[in-house]
Image (tube, rainbow, N blue to C red):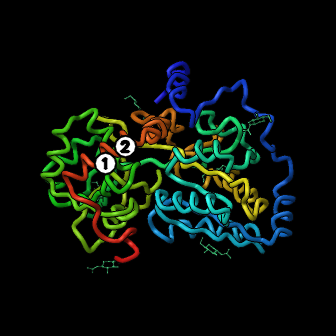
Amino acid sequence: MHAPCVAFLSLLAAIPALAYDTAFAFAANATIETRSIDEIYQAALAEGGLVTLWHGGDESNQQDSLKTAFEAKFPGMTLNVTVDLSKYHDQRIDEQLATNSLYVDSAILQTVHDYPRWKQEGALLNYQPAGFEQIHPAFKDIDAAYYGMFIIAWSNTWNTDKLNVSSISSYADFLRPEFKDKLVLTYPNDDDAVLFQFNTIMQTLGKGWFEALLQQNPRWVRGTGTPATLVGTANNSYVATFTSSIGLVPSLPMKIDHSTDAFFTSWPQTGAIFRDAPHPEGAKLLHNFLMSVEHQNATGTFSSRIDVASAGGYPGIFDMNNTNPTAFGEWMGDRAQVERFRFWIEDKIGSAQGLSPLIDDL
Ligand SMILES: *[C@@H]1O[C@H](CO)[C@@H](O)[C@H](O)[C@H]1NC(C)=O
Ligand SMILES: *[C@@H]1O[C@H](CO)[C@@H](O)[C@H](O)[C@H]1NC(C)=O
Ligand SMILES: *[C@@H]1O[C@H](CO)[C@@H](O)[C@H](O)[C@H]1NC(C)=O
Ligand SMILES: *[C@@H]1O[C@H](CO)[C@@H](O)[C@H](O)[C@H]1NC(C)=O
Ligand SMILES: *[C@@H]1O[C@H](CO)[C@@H](O)[C@H](O)[C@H]1NC(C)=O
Ligand SMILES: *[C@@H]1O[C@H](CO)[C@@H](O)[C@H](O)[C@H]1NC(C)=O
């Protein structure tokens, strides 16, 4: 979707989180990285060769490939990455900050509303990694305290071995008889980006859509990786989901599509380095690596950099139909509204059951 500039700025004005004015793109206070990646690497090695990253996600192995790629590129470096739900990571970070016991260097989370608060509290480092000027203006803080590091987007996802269709291009499609007992979805009340998806669909299609969905008897699970994993596994009857993100170029038998009858959720997964990070050079090396053209181009999804094309021939996220990648951040800032909708949903489907992430136990 093309967001016209004026609408765009008025939208952003509502969120201090993402307020931005291109006239002030380069805040005086932020350190602008001018060293080569090798110079940063040497500094990180001299510092001890360690970086501690807390990454949002719902399967403990979700960032194993990042660890492997980073450590292969920078021998002698250790990326100590811990994946957990962002809503738990952030509380623990708050506790570390409050007790002066911070040992996390960098956090890349879905809880986008935390970053402006952390910035206000003086907890974040104002630092521009190489290529900062190429990050989309809507995805970065004016003082380079935080920025979107890649885009996550839910897509309609199905297994063609189980249901051989070429497209699932609407949320209304999931109400068809062939999906009865065959949908697997993440509890919206357990994940705010899924909650926002349901909120968006119901704003457009109404409460009737949700009531009809419940008649389909979907299986509710914890974690957004789990639905795609179950759909992708041959030995069960789950055919499709719309609460997972498996990238833009899945391998067969999996296929994806995006709905046209209501917006799908997309947002910049946001990252920051802490001001009191014990390994600032390691964290800078990691952020330069993550924001590099080479890495952004290899994520298999939409980039937060304007100079890196989306995977699979898709347009940039702002040129996709039926999504607004800044809307989630705005919605997340109003916690009272989020909680009201969470408990409206929870009243209908019950509290989240099972381990989180479930998949570690499958
Ligand atoms: C930048 O520096 C000015 C003057 O010292 C200060 O008032 C302002 O809060 C700083 N901004 C940030 C983001 O640190
Ligand atoms: C690695 O991270 C874990 C979890 O955050 C932490 O408990 C552990 O102390 C870290 N290890 C090192 C070597 O810093
Ligand atoms: C799905 O249908 C297409 C076109 O009809 C066919 O080429 C393909 O082999 C089918 N795939 C499976 C897994 O049945
Ligand atoms: C289904 O397959 C998965 C992955 O191959 C396996 O972990 C799981 O135990 C299997 N479940 C059943 C019920 O056979
Ligand atoms: C990005 O990836 C594509 C597909 O793998 C490749 O063709 C292209 O050369 C890459 N571009 C850059 C700038 O790395
Ligand atoms: C967006 O919608 C237009 C008009 O329906 C269509 O031609 C175009 O292919 C769509 N783009 C994407 C990426 O779906």
Type of residue at label 1?
Answer: Arg
Q: Element at badge 2?
A: helix
Question: Can you give x and y, in whole percent of width and height, for residue 124 in the image?
Answer: 68, 49
Q: Nearer the viewer, residue 31 or 94?
A: 94
Q: Residue at image x 26%, y 74%?
A: 235
- Check the image and name the residue furthest to the top: 6
| x then y, percent, for residue 185 | 29, 57
- Residue at numbered disc 2: 338
Question: Which label belongs to residue 276?
Answer: none
Ligand 3 positioned in quadrant: bottom left
Asked if 59 appears above or below 143 in the picture, the reply is below
Image position of 63 with respect to 158: above or below: below
Residues at circles 1 and 2 in contact by the CB criterion of under 8 Å: yes
User: In the image, what residue occupies the spot 73% across and 27% down?
Assistant: 24
Judge the density around disc 2: few (<14), some (14-19), many (≥20) Cα neighbours within 10 Å: some
One can see residue 305 in this view? yes
Judging depth in this view, the residue of 50 and 291 nearest the camera is 50
Res 311 seen here: no
Residue at 75% across, 44% down: 128
Q: Which residue is label 1 attached to?
A: 342
